Each structure stands twice: as structure tokens, then as C-alpha cells.
Image (cartoon, helix red, strand yellow):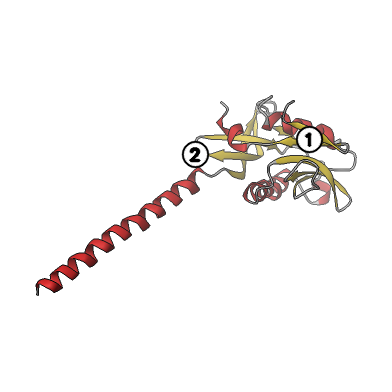
Amino acid sequence: MKLQRSISFIIATLLAVFGNIVLGELVHSTLRAEEKVQFVCSQSYDNISGTYVPSTLAWNPNNKKPIVIWKSEDHSGNGFPPQKRCEEISPRFQAAYDNGSLKYITSGIMNGQPVICTARLVGDDCATLLITLRHQDNAKRTLHQLSDILLGYTDAPLEQSSGDLVYYEDDRIYIEVDIEEFLSQP
């Protein structure tokens, strides 16, 4: 009888110890998920128009910042009004963040279209498409505007109607991006 109690006590102790370890890891992984940067399509207040407009936002539990506000109707004729562009492009930022290619942002050509995309290293080709531009858009200007936002040189988001962390390689510009640093700025 004493042996059975001792075995029961040992089993109960082991279950409590291992249960706490598993529970602790579950809580820790849940907290890590909550701290993760997320990119979403939401609404931001536009001071110029006095209205809320579709916006690609980067956020974590401590901060939320618009990266791009979608006001331009230039792509509406192709079936991409501002709200739809926001809904299509915001997940691309998330995919680039999740797959680790949001290290550098550059411009390039994909499927014959000028684009803003990510690259894993300076000199690499596009890894993840972020924004498709029109042929008449100036990709380098758009890239510089986006870099000013992400590097904290301006607090105004890129309005899609129009340093030391900037690298030039083979006539291409690569902007080094640190989203966590971007979100930690006031």
C-alpha cells in the first residue's frame, strides 16, 4: 500500500512538473505571438481630406503606424480601387516580414511591371512583391518616399498617389529596414 502511494506521489509530482513546463512554454509562445509585428489593412485619418482612408498599418502591442495610405484612384480602372489595393498589398508586407525578406526594400521589374519589392541581401533580385506601380510612376521616387517613412525621417505615410541605411548596387537602391525599430519610434 505504501509503495502504491509512493508511486502515485511520484507520478503526480512528475505530471505537475512537466505540466508546468508545457504550460509555461504555451504561455511564452502566446506572448511571443502577441508581440509579433503585424501588417493590416485598416483605416487612418487623413488630415488633408478630413476623412478616413484605407491604410496599410504596421503594428505591435506598443504602437501602430501607417506605412501607406491608399487614396489614388489611378488603379481603379484596372479593378483595384484604394480599398482593394490596401487589402491586396497589406498581406504582402506580412508575408515579407514572415518569410524574412523584409530586410531590404528595393525597386525592380516583375511580370513586365515596375514594382517595389523586398530583397534578402544587397544586390539580390526581388524576393517578395510589395507594391505594383504604373509604368509612368517613378519607382525610385516611390522607394525613397517609403524609405523616409520606414527610416523615421518623416512621420507621414507614403501617399500612393504619387543615408546610412541606403545602399546602391548596379543602379538599384536597397533600403535596409528594421520594422521593430520603426514601431519603437514615437
Q: Amino acid at mark 1?
A: Leu
The quadrant the N terminus occupies is bottom left
Q: Regarding mark 2 in the picture, which secondary structure is present there?
A: loop
In the image, what residue occupies the spot 88% across and 39% down? 170
Task: Give the alpha-carbon distance from disc 2 to disc 1, as whole Å.
Answer: 27 Å
- Residue 99 appears at what percent x and percent y? 65, 51
Q: Nearer the viewer, residue 75 or 138?
A: 138
- Residue 89 appears at what percent x and percent y? 70, 47
Of marks 2 and 1, which one's residue comes earlier in the chain?
2
> From the viewer's perspective, is 19 left or right of 11?
right
- State which quadrant residue 156 falls in: top right
Judged from this view, the residue extending furthest toward the front is 3
Q: Amino acid at mark 2?
A: Pro
Q: What residue would you read off at disc 1?
A: 143
Residue 61 - label: 2
- Residue 10 appears at what percent x and percent y? 21, 65
In the image, what residue occupies the spot 29% across and 58% down? 17
- State which quadrant residue 161 falls in: top right
